[in-house]
Amino acid sequence: MPTSSGPNTAADSNIIFSYDTADVINSYRGEPTTNLYTTLGFSFYQEEGGHSATRTTGAAPGLNLPTNYDYHTITTTSNWENESKRLIIWPNNSLTGSTTYYVSFWARVISKQTAQIGSAFYGNALNNTLNLTSQWQRFSFSSITNSTYRALEIGSKDGALVFQIAGLQIEAKSHVTSYVNGTRSATQGLVPLIGNSSLDLSNVSFDSAAQITFDGTNDYINVSTNFGTVTQYTVEYVAYQGAYAKMPIASRTNSTFYKFGDYSWRYTHGGIGDEFYHSQTPSISGYIHCIVTYDGDLVKVWRNGYYAGSKASAGTADFSNGFKIGYWSDGGDYAWLGDIPIIKIYNTSLSPEQVKQNYQKYKSRFNLS
């Protein structure tokens, strides 16, 4: 019985599609990126002038990362001012000169409870001061490569030290993303919690925290899997609405079955040209939890746990062509502005009790009213 995509209701086994961007283990693996450190290869200085650096391949002790990466145990006898007291990593000298890259890694001190180290690309002062403890922490900073030498330097700013770094990542980005050993493609960043759908992130934006966001113009997540047609269903989502946004929360080509925006609800059932409007009173800003159910006779809408109305309808919902999340065009463009952290689709109609239970699951997390 799946529980990672929502509360453990009797209907959980009827979920045919879901994702949750807060579930970084099972669902949101991270913004597509390339870790240039792992793809370019590297060399580094060892045992010079009282400095030593031991490279080990595999899992760093006490750090839960993929096993196919390198970590270093670094011993220095004094501060980093002398080049020989630094760990110097050359990513094959193949990074572009005079270019800003984002650097990130985990680090901890072994010989003390706390300590300071510095890091930067060659030619820059080691002014990215990192405050280590005996526990692993992930650090990140941007730095500009030297026009000629593109080496990354890491050294002590606290005298004689023994410290470790692991999971080094160098990205051609303006912000840090989650660690990957190699490349994370547009179809590997977001994984469904249920089923084997391919979610393509090629057409969405990402904020400075590397979280998925929709820009209100043309962003969408494409879901290409054939889910067939269903005679009963539930669409559930949590989303953050920007000003004057319109959206289809999920749609197949040229057929919206539900969307929310501009203080109204609009529903087009299974391609039938009948629409259901429900005015918002009061309007809801910020995050909102929405559920639409269809039991074969009635379309019902809930927002933030409250029943919003119903309309008689007939037919089936056609998911055979998959759907898009966040964008639809029928002669006019309807694009979401904001975030959509959770989507769930069921092939059954949830009961009012189940709707309320699902709302309670997310109420505190998103500070819902």
Image: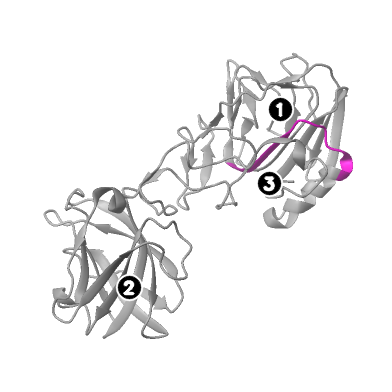
What residue lies at 66% left-to-right and 18% top-to-bottom?
255
Q: Residues within 10 Å of mark 3 (few under 14, many from 20)?
A: many
Q: Residues within 10 Å of mark 1 (few under 14, many from 20)?
A: many
- Taking the image as shown, residue 349 lies to the left or right of residue 333, namely right
Q: Position of residue 287 (x, y in %)?
A: 67, 47
Q: Which residues are magenta?
A: 339-353
Tell me the CA gap for discs 1 and 2: 50 Å
Q: Amino acid at mark 1?
A: Tyr
Residue in the foreground of this view, choosing between 88 and 241: 88
Residue 346 inside the magenta-drawn segment: yes
Q: Which residue is mark 1?
A: 258
Task: For mark 1, give the secondary structure.
Answer: loop
Q: Amino acid at mark 3?
A: Ser
Residue in the foreground of this view, choosing between 272 and 63: 63
Indicate which disc residue 94 carries.
none
Task: For mark 2, give the secondary structure.
Answer: loop
What residue lies at 80% left-to-right and 22% top-to-bottom?
231
Q: Nearer the viewer, mark 3 or mark 1?
A: 3
CB-based contact (under 8 Å), mark 1 and mark 2: no
CB-based contact (under 8 Å), mark 3 and mark 1: no
Toward which corner of the image does residue 292 lie, by quadrant?
top right
Q: Amino acid at mark 2?
A: Thr
Tell me the CA gap for discs 3 and 2: 39 Å
Task: For mark 3, give the secondary structure.
Answer: loop
Q: Nearer the viewer, mark 3 or mark 2?
A: 3
Q: Position of residue 165 (x, y in %)?
A: 34, 68
Q: Which residue is mark 3?
A: 5
Q: Residues within 10 Å of mark 2 (few under 14, many from 20)?
A: some
N-terminal of the pair, mark 1 or mark 2, is: 2
What residue lies at 44% left-to-right and 69% top-to-bottom?
137
Q: Which residue is mark 2?
A: 129
